Image: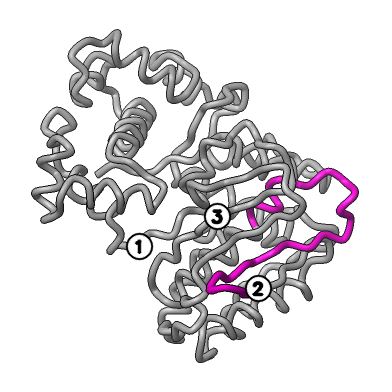
Amino acid sequence: MAKGTISICFVEALLDGVRQRGFDAEELLAESGISPSLLGLAHARVSAALYTVLVRLVVQTLDDEFFGLDSRRMKVGSFAMLGHAVIHCRSLERALVRALRFFALCIDDLSGELSQADGVARLVLREVHPDQPARIFAHETILMFVHRLACWLVNRRIPILSADFRYEAPPHVAEYALLFSAKVQFSQPKTALSFDARYLDMPVVRTERALKEFLRIAPENLLVQYKDSHSIGARLRRHLRPLSPEDWPSFEVMAVELGQSPSTLRRRLEAEGQSYQLIKDHLRRDMAINALSETGKSVMEIAADLGFAEPSAFHRAFKKWTGAKPGEYRRMVRAMPG
């Protein structure tokens, strides 16, 4: 089964918070098992497992569940209190209002405000210092925290209709379609997310027992896309993962297997900010990265496993995905001290 990967930009963002607090970022990086050589590759990716280890190390080192992104520390245990504060709310709206108030108590530089009009709910970030450059990872993180928490509480993915950001498009802008929405705008007056207001009336369905498991892996579980097992993208990935890439069906055949017309399947994927080709590319990319990092297979063998007729085609695709050739990437991943 293919395992997910995380853009190196999010690794660098975590390390920035560590450095600003005066700790040894390189030591944490080495302890997590992530090669420092990857930091020089703009399109490099690391396994989700290694990123999770780094997140935990940063939280423990800083005693900060907001990763050093604010003037005040969000001390370890804050998420546990947040979970208990929202788990018994009757509606998502009440839970979100309470969560935003909680974050306002824990951090100083950012706060959130929830409003609704014309059937659209809008979460807007307010900054204490709007005249200063926005801390991109802080904006990304607070939005992911609130949105992923909302999805978890109602046990379904809440599609983001649009996402606005106060800053210019960052180098990792390609990540935003999956992290937030296909409809993204930059250089806007405020950072904000919009979603269908009908979700605010949904009941909170999680239990104290589920909360215990949720908190065991928080906050790192809030930094990735909420996995709705019923989404069309998730169904597609479940169909593809057990198969060799060379056996992946055409879009038309896949639509038949899912009991939908091609036009309906395409429309549903677009609503989730995805496409069949994008899903296949991401699966191939993650399979390639994990094979190079964790197996002794040759590059030629990996290329064949991924359905590339020629190793040269795999080289071109991999360099497009990560910015490095497969062999070069493997050397960097394995070039750990000791």
Q: Give residue 25's position: percent from left, percent from top.
A: 71, 39
Residue 311's place in the image compared with 105, above or below, is above
Looking at the rendering, the stretch of residues picked out in magenta corresponds to 116-141
Residue at mark 1 to residue at mark 2: CA–CA distance:
27 Å
Q: Which residue is mark 1?
A: 228
Q: Residues within 10 Å of mark 2 (few under 14, many from 20)?
A: few
Q: Nearer the viewer, residue 221 or 53?
A: 221
Dot 3 or dot 2, earlier in sequence: 2
Helix, strand or loop for disc 3: strand
Helix, strand or loop for disc 1: loop
Left-right relation of 123 to 276: right
Q: Give residue 249's position: percent from left, percent from top.
A: 12, 36
Q: Nearer the viewer, residue 203 or 322?
A: 203
Q: Which residue is mark 3?
A: 162
Residue 307's place in the image compared with 61, above or below, is above
Are the two marked residues, 1 and 3, in contact with CB atoms closer than 8 angstroms? no
Residue 264's place in the image compared with 294, above or below, is below
The three-letter code of the residue at mark 2 reads Gly
Q: Quadrant of residue 192?
A: bottom right
Looking at the rendered image, the quarter that the N terminus falls into is: top left
User: Viewer-nearest of labels 1 and 3?
Assistant: 3
